Amino acid sequence: MSATPTVLGLDPSTECVGWGLVQSPMTLIRWGDLKPKPAKAHPWLLCVDLAGQVLRLVDELQPDAIAMEDLKFVKYELAGISGGMIRGAIVAALDHGEGRNY
């Protein structure tokens, strides 16, 4: 862990995964969004694509910790299911091992 820890915050949705890298005490370093490729129309392929993009981002930024926004309110059931699938795919990818401990 670096002297001043960095945290990668993730905000997953079916449209994109918003992200921000902050350094203590709450200094924004970088931010952006990850968008699925248009060809990934099937929900599971969309999840795998976004999870892969998150892993590449983590490898690039090397944060000390990762935080992900929780699903708080879902107006439509299918949106909640898709959002849960994306969150699950990202968590599974981050827990894949290979020296990561998030």
Image: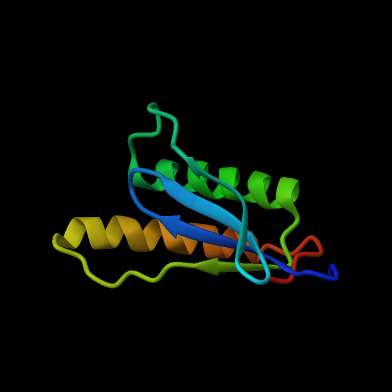
Seen at 55% across and 54% down, the residue is: 20
53 or 25, nearer to the observer: 25
Identity of the residue drawn at 65% across and 71% down: 25
Residue 75 vs residue 6, the one in the foreground: 6
Q: Quadrant of the C terminus?
A: bottom right
Q: For the N terminus, give its image quadrant.
A: bottom right
- Asked which quadrant contains residue 94, the reply is bottom right
Q: Is residue 60 left or right of residue 71?
A: right
Q: Position of residue 82 (x, y in %)?
A: 31, 55
Nearer to us in this view, 86 or 42: 86
Task: Describe residue 75's horizontal placement relative to residue 89 as left or right.
Answer: left
In the image, what residue occupies the spot 57% across and 63% down?
Answer: 92
Nearest to the observer: residue 58 or residue 8? 8
Q: Quadrant of residue 67?
A: bottom right
Colouring rule applied to residues: rainbow
| Residue 70 picture location, percent across and down | 39, 71
Q: Where's residue 77, x and y in %?
A: 17, 62
